[in-house]
Image (cartoon, rainbow, N blue to C red):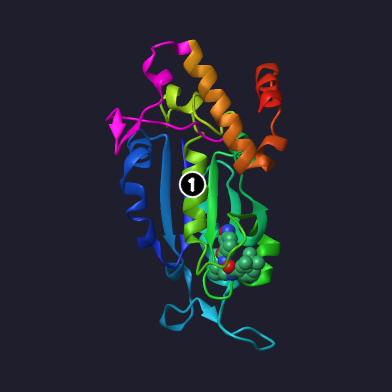
Amino acid sequence: MISFNIITIFPKIFKNFKKYGILKKAINKKIIEIKCWNLRKFTKYKRKKIDYRPYGGGPGMIMCASPIKKAIKQIKKKNKKKLKVIYLSPQGKKINTKNLIKILKINKKFILLCGRYEGIDERIIKQEIDEEWSIGDYILTGGELAAMVFIDAISRLIPGVLNKKSFSEESFFNGLLDYPQYTYPRVFNGEKVPKILLSGNHKKIRLWRLKKSLIKTKSKRPDLLKLKKLNSEEKKIIKDI
Ligand code: 4FN
């Protein structure tokens, strides 16, 4: 079982997140668990306060170290296995499939700390955080969405969460973008489904799809192609594009 322990001041944000689709199934199958810990339950300050103004002045509020430390301590106390403490933050390393696979190999239990306001006290990062991870370069109002991205993307990599077929046949498994896909009806708004897909020739279809994937990746995301180790078949196709 892979555990995600989320520390947040807005645990209700995750209510619906857990309730649908593949994640819901994975939770029911006990392959993953998603637990939310309300940071306000761990404060000793008046009126459940968890944030104060920054020393040195400046705008906004900073989340205090003490409630965060207490929350982490409590979660660790309730677990036998080691927990990896992750702060979702714009300073973190960018999430991608490769480094998610790697962290999942090493860790089974996670604490995901979600920041709000202007962020958290630096001493918590120094004393309690093992790793900082980011979902990209844009300003967010909080780390909760980033935690969801992390959980969603990691969960799909856990054996048993997806059925085998959709996992191995998927694009990004091979590091390429999707080939174009079509479903019912055969003609939509005057546009037909490519003939080859109706041919029943699976060898030809596979080759056509690979070629389309390579063409699309080369034109829209050449950066992905540079990262990828091409096999001889793919190299041959690329040469002709
Ligand atoms: N964001 C930048 C520079 C400085 C601040 C921010 C920013 C939420 C608590 C952090 C943002 C982006 C990706 C968490 C952004 C992420 C966050 C993330 C995040 C409230 C403080 C804050 C990158 C634009 C130069 C707000 C950029 N992945 N501060 O957004 O938590 O995980």
Residue drawn where x is 33% and y is 55% of the image: 15
Please give left or right for residue 8 compared with residue 29 in the image: right
Is 78 magenta? The answer is no
Residue 185 picture location, percent across and down: 27, 30
Specify whether residue 188 is painted magenta. yes
Binning the other alpha carbons within 10 Å of mark 1 as few (below 14), some (14 to 19) or many (20 upward) gives: some
- In what element is the residue under mark 1? helix
Nearest the camera: 98 or 108?
98
Disc 1 target residue: 151
Quarter residue 11 falls in: bottom left
Q: Residue furthest left?
A: 185
Which corner quadrant of the figure contains ligand 1? bottom right
Q: Callout 1, which amino acid?
A: Ile
Q: Residue at x 60, y 37 (%)?
A: 217
In the rendered view, would you say 237 is above or below 185?
above
In the image, what residue occupies the spot 66% across and 85% down? 55
Q: Is residue 97 above or below residue 170?
A: below
Q: Residue at x 68, y 70 (%)?
A: 122
Q: Position of residue 223 (x, y in %)?
A: 69, 42
On screen, residue 193 versus residue 239, left or right, reads left
